[in-house]
């Protein structure tokens, strides 16, 4: 043992963080490698972010050698984000069989705020007792509360769920994603109240423009605020005139 070091002591930079790729290079770059085990990641902004979240649910099913963790996913969906065609597309991109991928994504849909609260507070334990998942996604945690009208009681329930997710994630050593819309008062911050923000250790703001997606890391225990972006895929289905390829004859 080196002089001056106590047994079992390590600084934060010496501790090994276990991460998994989201399948989206821009997000992985922003997070220094991907999602981190034991932490809650709050993604907020445009609904376009749900495509990135669905891709993550597919990507974790890859082997560790291929950048995944060979794990199912449990999703509590209060944002109606699940699109079967997107799951199939991302499965093909990852060279996985779509039907097998879908079999390993376990979804519980909430249709009102009471169902959201019950699923998180009362059903979460039983989900993970039945499914050996390492990724938990709670999409649109405050969405139904917002649509029904926020009150003191509803804000308290959101706080209870945020605290539950933080402790559950740590105790089960999960990779957890929560999504929320931007705050109506300031789009740079997530909706859902201070407790939701404080219980999520990592925040990523996602916005969409006509030509690209912008990602901003607004909160992280290790990294400063930083940003990146990725271009949208071009549509090559448009028919162009021959002159577009031949150029101007005078040149």
Image (spheres, rainbow, N blue to C red):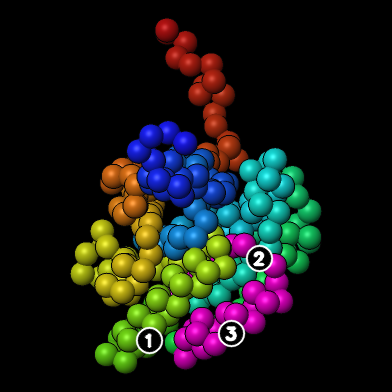
Residue underneath mark 1: 157
Is residue 228 located in the magenta-colored stretch of the structure? no
* Residue span colored magenta: 114-141
Q: How many marks?
A: 3
User: Quadrant location of residue 131?
Assistant: bottom right
Query: Callout 2: helix, strand or loop?
Result: loop
Horizontal side of residue 160 vs 174, given as left or right: left
Residue underneath mark 2: 133
Considering the image in quadrants, where does the C terminus appear?
Answer: top left
- 249 w.r.t. 126: above or below: above
Which residue does the image show at 54% across and 74% down from the upper left?
A: 77
Residue underneath mark 3: 123
Pinpoint residue 4: horizontal percent, then vertical percent.
35, 38
**Mark 1 residue crowding within 10 angstroms, few (<14) / some (14–19) / many (20+):** some
Pinpoint residue 180: horizontal percent, then vertical percent.
39, 68
The reply to whether residue 5 is visible in this rendering is yes
Pinpoint residue 90: horizontal percent, then vertical percent.
65, 51
């Amino acid at each position: 043992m080196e002089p001056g070091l106590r047994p079992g002591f390590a600084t934060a930079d010496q501790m090994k963080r276990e991460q998994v790729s989201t399948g989206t290079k821009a997000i992985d770059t922003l997070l220094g490698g991907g999602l981190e085990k034991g932490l809650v990641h709050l993604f907020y902004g445009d609904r376009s972010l749900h495509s990135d979240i669905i891709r993550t649910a597919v990507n974790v099913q890859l082997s560790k050698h291929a950048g995944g963790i060979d794990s199912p996913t449990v999703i509590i969906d209060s944002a109606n984000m699940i699109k079967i065609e997107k799951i199939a597309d991302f499965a093909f991109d990852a060279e996985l069989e779509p039907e097998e991928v879908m079999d390993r994504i376990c979804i519980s849909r909430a249709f009102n705020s009471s169902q959201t609260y019950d699923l998180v507070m009362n059903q979460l334990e039983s989900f993970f007792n039945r499914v050996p998942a390492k990724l938990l996604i709670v999409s649109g945690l405050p969405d139904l509360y917002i649509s029904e009208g926020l009150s003191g009681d509803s804000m308290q329930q959101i706080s209870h769920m945020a605290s539950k997710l933080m402790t559950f994630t740590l105790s089960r050593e999960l990779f957890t994603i929560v999504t929320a819309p931007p705050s109506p008062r300031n789009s740079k911050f997530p909706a859902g109240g201070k407790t939701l923000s404080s219980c999520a250790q990592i925040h990523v703001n996602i916005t969409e423009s006509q030509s690209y997606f912008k990602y901003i890391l607004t909160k992280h225990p290790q990294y400063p605020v930083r940003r990146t972006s990725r271009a949208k895929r071009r549509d090559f289905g448009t028919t162009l005139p021959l002159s577009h390829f031949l150029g101007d004859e005078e040149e």
